[in-house]
């Protein structure tokens, strides 16, 4: 049995950031993931300058042999209406491929890793957690996404009535012919909102890679919505007519409607395992990174790993992201004043799509970067 001070389940951006942040804390850390890296991870994949700053990423170094697509415009519309394009005048985000980004972050940390290792059993014995009867630690951190096994130990909240966003997407490298035919531009991601405002679709070109997807607050007619969107994009020339492969599905929780407790005795959740995706956009990379930094600060100074002590992390999350609202509220947090019929008019407004949709909902430019503490 190998003993550690904490074991992190999940080596994505949240898990690797937490491990990196605690490298010099004197704590013995083990990072476990069911997959080997680099691994396939379909994701629209853009990161804001706040994420770059928080992770102290050298853009020139990262962009060497990796996809790094500067973004300075957004093209936004409601399905069935013409889109509005806004030029922000400078780079406001960067397109990345998650298979590269996650592998890069993981490679930066020197903590011991057990990759390609599914978690088959978690047993509580005395004050320790035993993983697969092979590893033990008094603190277990769940960073394994929506279906993280650590999250199941804490529970899915009262009655499990959380609103789950379901999404389907595809990412592939275009052939020269496809790239020539595709009218979507790399510096201009496209966002298309469903008419009922219960989700949105996107077209995001990153160099010769193209990502297309659609997410809604539940599975209701998700495939039908996606098929209609894809056909419209093909007809208008936004995407190639011959898409390869099948769309992959995934799920996540929106912050305001996730009912999961964040801590318990010897347990702590970060990233999508904690249900931290931004309620207005569903974007989860920045909340994942910031939750890991906040967790690292609490773990570094914790005298014990009781729920009472770890609640300082829950308090820090509430201070950073706000207090969660009632889990009975539905889906994407679109204010009542934006509901139909006003929504169609607002989505044709350059001011609204730039200042509210892009800069506030998707980029959270009003929120300064969260720096790592040493």
Image (cartoon, helix red, strand yellow):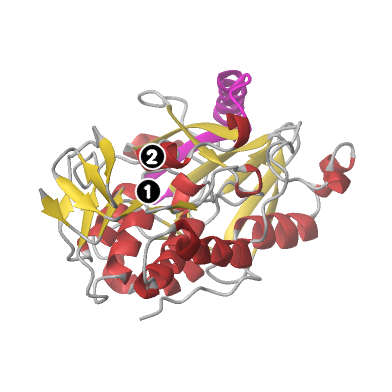
Estimate the x, y position of residue 261 in percent, counting from the top left. 54, 47
Estimate the x, y position of residue 171 in percent, counting from the top left. 39, 37
Q: Is residue 116 left or right of residue 288?
A: left
Look at the image and say whether residue 162 sits in the magenta stretch: no
Viewer-side residue, 99 vs 372: 372
- Pick out the residue farthest to the bottom: 374
Instruction: Say whether residue 180 is visible.
Output: no
Badge 2 density bin: few <14, some 14–19, many ≥20, Cα 10 Å: some
Label 1, label 2: how far apart the Cα atoms are: 6 Å
Residue that numbered label 2 is attached to: 148
Q: Quadrant of residue 259?
A: top right
Circles 1 and 2 in contact, beta carbons < 8 Å? yes
Badge 1 density bin: few <14, some 14–19, many ≥20, Cα 10 Å: many
Q: Is residue 254 above or below residue 235?
A: below
> What residue is rendered at 36% in x and 66% in y?
304
> What residue is rendered at 55% in x and 20% in y?
223
Estimate the x, y position of residue 47 in percent, counting from the top left. 46, 60
Q: Is residue 155 above or below residue 52?
A: above
For the magenta stretch, what is the residue range?
Answer: 206-235
Estimate the x, y position of residue 351 in percent, counting from the top left. 79, 60
- Pick out the residue farthest to the front: 126
Q: Earlier in the sequence, mark 1 or mark 2?
A: 1
Tag 1's secondary structure?
strand
């Amino acid at each position: 049995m190998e003993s550690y001070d904490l074991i992190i389940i999940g080596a994505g951006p949240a898990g690797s950031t937490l491990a990196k942040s605690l490298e010099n804390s004197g704590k013995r850390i083990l990072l476990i993931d069911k997959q080997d890296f680099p691994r396939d991870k379909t994701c629209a994949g853009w990161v804001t300058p706040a994420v770059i700053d928080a992770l102290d990423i050298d853009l020139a170094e990262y962009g060497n042999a990796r996809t790094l697509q500067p973004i300075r415009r957004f093209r936004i519309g409601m399905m069935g209406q013409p889109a509005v394009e806004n030029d922000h005048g400078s780079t406001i985000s960067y397109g990345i491929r998650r298979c590269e980004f996650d592998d890069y972050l993981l490679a930066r940390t020197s903590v011991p890793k057990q990759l390609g290792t599914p978690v088959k059993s978690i047993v509580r014995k005395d004050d320790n957690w035993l993983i697969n009867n092979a590893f033990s630690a008094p603190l277990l951190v769940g960073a394994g996404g929506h279906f993280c096994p650590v999250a199941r130990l804490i529970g899915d909240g009262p009655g499990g009535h959380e609103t789950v966003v379901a999404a389907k997407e595809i990412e592939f490298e275009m052939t020269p012919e496809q790239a020539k035919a595709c009218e979507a531009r790399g510096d201009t991601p496209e966002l298309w909102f469903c008419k009922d405002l219960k989700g949105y679709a996107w077209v995001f070109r990153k160099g010769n890679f193209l990502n297309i997807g659609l997410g809604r607050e539940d599975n209701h007619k998700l495939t039908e919505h996606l098929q209609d969107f894809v056909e419209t994009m093909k007809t208008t020339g936004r995407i190639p007519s011959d898409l390869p492969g099948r769309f992959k599905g995934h799920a996540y929780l929106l912050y305001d409607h996730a009912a999961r407790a964040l801590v318990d005795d010897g347990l702590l959740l970060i990233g999508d395992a904690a249900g931290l995706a931004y309620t207005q956009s569903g974007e989860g990379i920045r909340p994942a990174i910031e939750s890991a930094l906040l967790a690292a600060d609490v773990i570094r100074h914790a005298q014990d790993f009781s729920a009472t002590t770890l609640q300082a992390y829950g308090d820090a999350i509430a201070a950073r992201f706000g207090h969660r609202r009632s889990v009975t509220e539905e889906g994407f947090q679109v204010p009542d004043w934006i509901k139909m019929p006003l929504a169609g008019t607002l989505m044709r407004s350059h001011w609204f799509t730039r200042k509210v949709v892009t800069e506030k909902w998707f980029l959270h430019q009003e929120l300064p970067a969260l720096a790592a503490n040493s």
